[in-house]
Structures are given as structure tokens and as C-alpha cells.
Amino acid sequence: MRTRLFSVALLMSFLTTLSAQDIYLPVSSSSEAAKSQYFKALQAGEQVNIPGFFDGMKAAVKTDPNFFMAYVNLAFAETAFGQYEKAAAFIKPALAIDPARFNECEKIHRKALEAWAKDPKADPAKYMEALTAAYPNTAEAHDLAGKSAKWLSKDSKASVKHFLRLLELRPNYGGGYNSLGYSYLELGEMDKAKTAFEKYLEVSPNEANAYDSMADYFMTNKEYAKSVEYYDKAAAMGMSSAIKRADQARAAMKGNVAVVDGLYQAFAKGDVPAVLAVMDAGIVWNEAESYPYADKNPYIGPDAVLNGVFTRIGAEWEYFNLTDIQLHDMSGNQVLATLRYKAKHKTTGKTIDSQTAHLWTLKDGKITAFQQFTDTKQAAEAVK
């Protein structure tokens, strides 16, 4: 599960620029009306309003047909979406503009457009490096360079470098933490990704996209219950696209519950091979402290569980039934089972009827850990 899960949220952030006028890259336009439309379009991109972004940029070039940076934004956005023919429709008029009065930012972007005119998939990395070198203290330069590195150059390490510099310049910029989080996700640096998304929520608590991004983190980390929680929050705040992803997370949650349910059904039938089959090769199994079979905790691997727990139960108890099983999907890719043990010991003839809970941890459809909670006093007295 890589880019497609969270591509929409990150691609929205590709269109994000910074909200303070004094940290934008310079633009050349003689029309104040066109510049107003341009900056409103950038604000729409910040708010994940993609139609608003495109409509605003198109309005800017309609008002001022020589507004070079408006064409640049349209071309970059379409290229990021993989819409190369649409991008070409903006590149051509941009390159037709006389560059005699271009500032350094526009000159650099013109070179990038020239490269795309020859090859729509040309890597713009060197132009973005030139941009940040020319504007080392302009936050938007690092914002654009980071998103270009991530989406166009496919270089997440470079994107992290630019986003970290961006956030040095704009420490309270939520979109920067969002972009940084997705770059860390792509690199598999999950702790750093979570920290970035948490910071995004901290600085932008009223943005639905902040909750959607955190949900993407939990979905990628297979913490399905938490992802549902955050997708639902984003949906409640108006992000309709989060509804479908919440449903996907709920379906994944049911997958974990189904694995554990199948294990209990196999156990009830005495199908031990089926029980062992759903265990990860490195499963860590712990019986409740002071329980008769806790003496060899932890049991590592299915064979250890079979020989240290299941075989001993079969040899020592006349029957050992699990009843009243209720399964509860938990955060952290876990399933909690509440149930009762009803059993009779072969030697003593004593019975138990004890309230019990099992906490199962899963990954990729396999059980990686088990923790038992039960009435250990009943079990201890039954075996005396």
C-alpha cells in the first residue's frame, strides 16, 4: 500500500503554497486583478479545493494572458496528476511570453517548462535545486522543490530535505508537516511520519485534511480502528472523499476479526493444524501470570505454543471449552476476545468457570502476539 492510498491528500498538498505575501516567490504581472485571482487560487489549493485552484489560475491567465507563473502552476499541477497533454496546453502559451523582464524565479521555471516541452516526463530536480539556491530564505521555494522532488522526481529523501528547510522558515505551516509526513511514509519511517502528522493536527486543528492525513498514516500502519476514527472525523468536517476510505478501513478491521474468529472455530473443532496455520512464525505467546502454563513464558513460534500449551491442556484436562466468545476490534491492529473458560481437570475432577480475555495482535493476516487474562486462582485450585 503505497501512493494510491494517500495520493489524493498528498497531491492536494502539491498545490499548497504559503499564506503570507512576504514569503511567496515573486511573480510578474501588471494586473492587480490577475494577481488577486492568482493568490486566491493558491489559497484554494491550501484548502484542498482543486476546482477552485484550477478555476482561479485559469481566471488569472484570462485576465492577464502574460501571467507566466499562473501558467507554471497549471502546468506543474497537471504534470503532477500525470495529465501531460493538459500540461502541454499551458506550457505552450507560457513559453510564448517574452522573457525579457522575467525575474530569476521565472527564468528558472522557464527552463523547466522548456525541458517538459521536449519530454513531458523530464526530471525537474536541477531546476528546483537552482530555485532554492536562488531563494534560500523563501519558504515557497522549498515547498515547491519538496513537492516536485516527491511527485515528479520520485525522490522522497530530497523532498524531506526541502520540507525540513521549509518548516525552519515556516514552523507553524500545517501543509509543510503534511507533505513531510507523506514523504516519511514513502520512506517507511513510520515514527517520523506520525510525528509530522501529529504536528499538522496541532497547528491546523480545523482542517479536515489534517485528520484525513493522520487516518492515512494509521491505514498504512494497519491500525484500522484508529484510521476509521480519523477518516470519520475528516468526513464530518466536510471531506466527502474520506467516507470511502473509512469504509475500506472498516473492511480491513473485519479481516482481522475474521482471522481470530476462524481460529476459535478451528479450536472448537479440535483442528489444531488450522489454529497453528494462522500464527506467524515468530508469534510471541504469553499466558497470564501465575497461570499453570505461564511457567515457560513467552512461547516463541507455533511449535512452542503447541508443545508448551495445547499439548499440556489436552493431557491434563478432561475437557476445556471456550464459551460466550465476543470479538472486539481494537486499535494497533489488535482484536480483543472476551469469553469464559469451562473446563474439568482429569486428576482432581475439579471444574472451572472463569471470566477470560484474550488480546491478539495481527499483521498481514497472521497472529504475531497473544496475551491471556483470566482467573488464575480458579485454575490454580483446580489443579491442586
Image (cartoon, grey):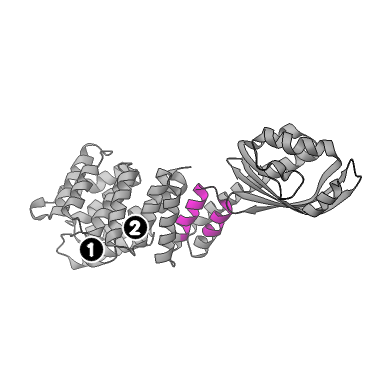
Residue position for label 2? 176
Residue 384 image point, x, y percent: 86, 47
Q: Residue at x 69, y 44 (%)?
A: 260
Q: Main secondary structure of the magenta part?
A: helix
| Res. 23 mark | 1
Type of amino acid at the residue the image marks with label 2: Gly
How far, Cα to Cα, is label 2 from label 1? 14 Å
State the image coordinates of residue 335 (x, y, percent, origin top left): 65, 50
Answer few, some or many: residues within 10 Å of disc 1's Cα (few below 14, many 20 plus, some between 14 and 19): some
- Work out whether mark 2 precedes mark 1 in sequence or the reverse, and give the earlier one: 1
> Which residue corresponds to the image point at 68% horizontal and 35% vertical from the top-left?
304
Label 2: few (<14), some or many (≥20) within 10 Å?
many
In the image, 270: left or right of 240? right
Magenta part of the chain: 211-231
Residue farthest right in this picture: 349
| Element type at mark 2 | helix
Q: Nearer the viewer, residue 42 or 293?
A: 293
